[in-house]
Amino acid sequence: MTTSDERFYAELGELTRFEDVASLAAYTPAPSSWVVVITDVRGSTKAIEAGRYKDVNALGVASIVAVRNAIPDVEIPFVFGGDGATLLVPGSRLDAIKPALRGLQKTAESAFDLGLRAGLVPVSTLRESGHDVLVARYRASSDAVFAMFGGSGLSEAERRVKDPELGPAHEVGAGAASADFTGFQCRWQPIPARHGEVISLLVQARASDRASAAAIYGEVVRRLEGIVEGGGRPVAVEGLRLATQTKLFEAEAKLLSGRARGLGFAWRRLQVSTLTSIGRVLLAKGWNALGFPGATYRESVAANTDYRKFDDTLRMVLDVSATQRRAIEAYLAAEHEAGRLVYGVHAADAALMTCIITDLQANHVHFVDGANGGYALAAKQMKAQLKVA
């Protein structure tokens, strides 16, 4: 049975308008007993430049799957960052979470030949150093709720975990390693841009206090919504096609088998390919069978995507025209020149989607990133601005 402390996130009220994520009143301080979990693919930029962006995205989503499966009775807030994830977990459950993170690291190495950083930073430690962790729930659809984070705590936690001197103190350490990736799925074809481009966008306010930062974020959200005229959603029903190419099933097969080749990997790939073929038929016919709601699944997938989020950084994946993208970049460049923010933008011709499926009828969420690097390459631009800020 969960304790009242462990029910913190589940019992928060919900926002229903995305523009409200910029409001200070929307957030509640996280319990000091909770812990920030940071995962990050080491050398992700080089891996992406080598064409391995699907693998990098897969490990980011797998981080969320592994931790959620380790404590299935506790609802936890999380955010997908492209090449990793950030989660907030109750400190009372670290005995279950640490083996899952070690298992994730082991799988990243054995199946993907990639290193994965996993760090734990107590909220109390962040708060004592002047960095708070604030949390809100945003209802994106009737079936999907996503966490939003305020304060500077998550950015500070990431800095500590990646710092050569501070990082070792936050590592998960040695011990049992076992991760459950049940629910991870990666079966959609890249989703082509409807208006010409899919941009992955990151914005960080540069302000001396929380109220000023909130005002900057609020203005950015309003201006962006004005430029894209209330649209920008990168996942639409007409663009959703289940994959046919065997190569697109490899990330899921690697993760679930724990290896990049051999019989176990081949069996998982065949299994995923077969199930996807069945899914294509059910979608085409609009049939509901085997627990798969073929008549309505595309609509619910489009509704349950996380294309807009906030975690000390405003993150968006938007489907825009070239003219709209230039207008967005011109606006952000002017705001950056004025010292109000730093930003990164990466443009691609399609979006990628990686999924967590608990229940095909309703309990499924879908993480969106731009193709060919998305958030990770947008972050490269933003980090360059931070170095000279």
Image (spheres, rainbow, N blue to C red):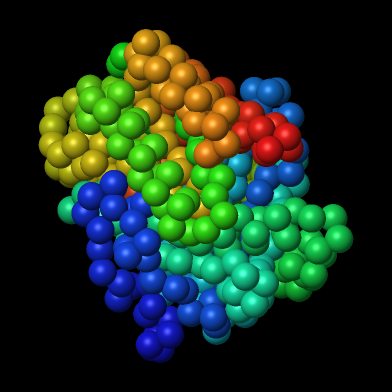
- For this orientation, the residue located farthest to the right is 165
**Which residue lies at the image location 46% right of the left edge and 52% below the top edge?**
212
Is residue 238 or residue 285 the one in the foreground? 238
Residue farthest to the front, as pictured: 338
What is the x, y in percent for residue 322? Answer: 40, 11
Residue 309 locus on image (x, y percent): 40, 46
**Is residue 307 in view?**
no
Camera-side residue of 230 and 200: 230
Image spot of residue 343 (x, y percent): 55, 33
Is 65 above or below relative to 201? below
- For residue 36, side relative to residue 117 (left or right): left
Question: Is the N terminus in the top left, top right, bottom left or bottom right quadrant?
Answer: bottom left
**Residue at 51% from the left image edge and 52% from the top image edge:** 312
Toward which corner of the image does residue 238 lie, by quadrant? top left
In depth, the one of 22 and 259 nearer the eye is: 22
| x, y percent for residue 258 | 64, 49
Which residue is painted at 37% across and 11% down in the image? 323
